[in-house]
Image: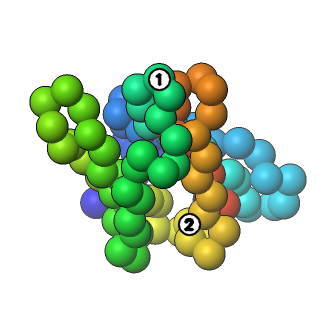
Amino acid sequence: MFTLEQFLQNTTWNPTLEDAGESGKKILHMRLQVKPGTTLDNLKITRNGHDFRVDFENKAGPEYKQVMIWPTADLQKLKTEVRNDGFLHITVPIKV
């Protein structure tokens, strides 16, 4: 197991915490870099419990990235979005 500080050091998923406005609650925001022009239709996103996986194609063929979402995350409120900044954004409320 790892600490929240260690989790926030992940350079693949670039996690940060944002204030959720409620005491003891934060928004976990993760960003996974994707190639330009990628849409959610180009990605296969799966979740099994707290395991979150993104499958995609690159020049070398199929590839995936996987992360275990923080254990206190409210997975019912997890959201994903591909933005024009070249990242897949994942947001989910957590208790800290």
Looking at the picture, tell me which residue is in the foreground, 2 or 90.
Answer: 90
Place residue 82 in its image quadrant.
Answer: top right
Q: What quarter of the picture does the C terminus occupy? A: bottom right
Height in image: 27 above or below 86? Answer: below
From the image, tell me which residue sits under label 2: 73
Q: In the orientation shown, which residue stands out farthest toward the left?
A: 60
Height in image: 73 above or below 87? Answer: below
Label 2: few (<14), some (14–19) or many (≥20) C-alpha neighbours in 10 Å: many
Height in image: 34 above or below 30? Answer: above
Q: Which mark is residue 54?
A: none
Label 1: few (<14), some (14–19) or many (≥20) C-alpha neighbours in 10 Å: few
SS under mark 1: loop
Q: Nearer the viewer, mark 1 or mark 2?
A: 1
Residue 69 spot, x, y in % from top left: 44, 59
Q: What quarter of the picture does the N terminus occupy? A: bottom left
Q: How many marks?
A: 2
Looking at the picture, tell me which residue is in the foreground, 87 or 15.
Answer: 87
Q: Give amino acid for label 2.
A: Ala
Residue at 62%, 34% in the rendered image: 83
Residue at 68%, 52% in the rendered image: 27
Left or right, residue 79 beside residue 52: right
SS under mark 2: loop
Looking at the picture, tell me which residue is in the foreground, 65 or 7.
Answer: 65
Q: Is residue 44 visible?
A: yes
Colouring style: rainbow
Q: Which mark is residue 36?
A: 1
Q: Give amino acid for label 1.
A: Pro
Residue at 42%, 46% in the rendered image: 42
